[in-house]
Image (cartoon, rainbow, N blue to C red):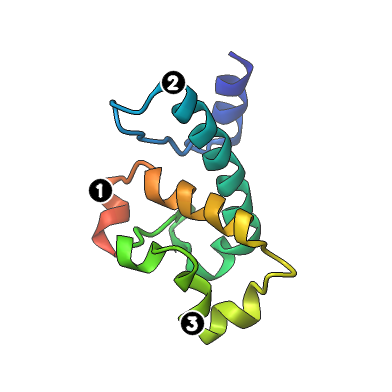
Amino acid sequence: MLLIIASCATGRKQVQHNFPAEMSASVREQYLHDWQKGKVLYQENCAGCHNKRKGRREHIPVFPADKLAGYGIRLDNADHERAIPETRVTTDELVSIITFLTYKVHTIKDTVRQH
């Protein structure tokens, strides 16, 4: 109840996740932990460059699966190597960010512009 009130008070919609139905409860619990951690890490380290503003709303773009493929997200892009070196975002943290972006529920507005 408190979470809903806090969400309404800030006027921000909560980002939701969409895990596969066949995922076991224990795996889902671990993914949820990684997803929540990745959400925070994304906001701290990635949103400033990747998110798009439309009016007062901020949208997280849809990242195609090939862009999220493992560690390549950092190594294939010189800007990422400079902006998020391993001393700032560890490999484990990067995995959590990728988990967040992979299982984040996408809205119609998100899918208009893929990243």
- Of tags 1 and 2, the one toward the viewer is 2
Which circle's residue, 1 or 3, is located before the other in the chain? 3
Q: Residue at x 37, y 68 (%)?
A: 67
Image quarter of the N terminus: top right
104 up-or-down from 114: above or below = above
The residue tagged 3 is 77
Determine whether the residue tagged by mark 2 lies in a helix, strand or loop.
Answer: helix
Q: Amino acid at mark 2?
A: Ala
Query: Residue visible at 57% across and 59% down?
Result: 94
Q: Do the CB atoms of the residues marked 3 and 2 lie less than 8 Å apart?
A: no
Q: Mark on residue 108?
A: 1
Q: Which amino acid type corresponds to the residue marked 1 in the rendered image?
A: Ile
Residue toward you, 4 or 40: 40
Rendering coords of residue 74 (x, y %): 53, 74
Quarter-wise, where is residue 8 in the image?
A: top right
Classify mark 3: residues with Cα within 10 Å, few (<14), some (14-19) or many (20+). Answer: few
